[in-house]
Image (cartoon, rainbow, N blue to C red):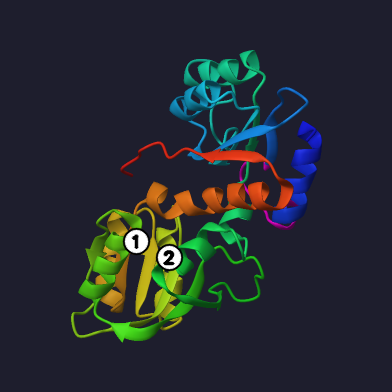
Amino acid sequence: MNNFELETLLNGFLKPHLIKDYCPNGMQVEGKPDVMKVVTGVTASQALIDAAITHGADAVLVHHGYFWRGEPEPIKGMKFRRIKALIEHGINLYAYHLPLDVHPEVGNNAQLASLLGIEQRGGLEDGNPNSVAVWGELPDAITGDAFSALIESRLNRKPLFINGGSHRNIKRVGWCTGGGQDYIDLAASKGMDAFISGEVSERTTFSAREQGIHYFGAGHHATERYGIQSLGEWLAENHKMDVTFIDIDNPV
């Protein structure tokens, strides 16, 4: 497939034009015109690029790419080395941030819900059809400790569990993968029993305790590895592309 045709295909599926983001979505670095082999991963780190080179990839498709709003603009140091490696090996880089978080099928939020057995009901942000934070329900109410154990078993990572009240079981769950910890206040105002995000802030502890909502910090990387993996599977199944997901370890 032509590299720009692949970008058009991904844009049509993920619809980044409908979502206001703070980084460019789509092709970020142009490489060779013909794309046959794709490597997917969470972040376009040097380790992922090196693995893509080893695999002979024509493209790298990630959730976390480059050129974030507010980051230093000069291409030097770490950024230079990464981009230089991509250009020297003719590797296209495609990145999709919020469009991948919110996609109803392959998105990070949707995939986390599927893993944890949560039936997604809708967005937490009123009037926003592309709400980054969402909510749903478990089939049966369970304790905070039981839900913590479920998250650990499905994500292979022990979450940070802040108990919002030991008496409160969990049925209604709000979540936002990655750095969505500040949606906990919105989740509490909507009557959620628990809230999950990837990252946690110092203030999150007190929000949970004082508003009586259980909080689970399950890891930014751990909560967002499944969306990009699912997107790659969609490419392979529907467009017959050679796609390999590479999970670069990240404890955060």
Looking at the rendering, which quadrant does residue 87 occupy?
Answer: top right
- The one of 124 and 118 positioned closer to us in this rendering: 118
Residue 149 visible in the picture: yes
**Label 2 crowding class (10 Å Cα cut-off): few <14, some 14-19, many 20+?**
some
**Left or right placement of residue 252 versus residue 88 in this view:** left
Q: Is label 1 in a helix, a strand or a loop? A: helix
Looking at the rendering, which quadrant does residue 137 occupy?
Answer: bottom left
Q: Amino acid at mark 1?
A: Arg
Mark 2 sits on what residue?
A: 115
Looking at the rendering, which quadrant does residue 244 occupy?
Answer: top right
Task: Choose the circle earlier in sequence order: 1 or 2.
Answer: 2
Judge whether residue 24 is colored magenta: yes
Q: Position of residue 11 (x, y in %)?
A: 75, 48
Mark 1 sits on what residue?
A: 154
Judge whether residue 203 is colored magenta: no
Q: Position of residue 165 (x, y in %)?
A: 21, 79
Up/down of 224 relative to 38, above or below: below
Check if mark 1's residue and mark 2's residue have beta carbons within 8 Å. yes
Q: Is label 2 in a helix, a strand or a loop? A: helix
Q: Amino acid at mark 2?
A: Leu
Q: Residue at x 78, y 25 (%)?
A: 33
**Label 1 crowding class (10 Å Cα cut-off): few <14, some 14-19, many 20+?**
few
**Left or right placement of residue 55 versus residue 248 in this view:** right
- The one of 163 and 236 positioned closer to us in this rendering: 236
Up/down of 166 relative to 109, above or below: below
Q: Residue at x 39, y 77 (%)?
A: 188
Stretch of the chain drawn in magenta: 16-25
Numbered label attached to residue 82: none
**Left or right placement of residue 82 versus residue 24 in this view:** left
Q: Residue at x 37, y 70 (%)?
A: 195
| Magenta-drawn stretch, dominant element (helix, strand or loop) | loop
Q: Residue at x 44, y 72 (%)?
A: 174
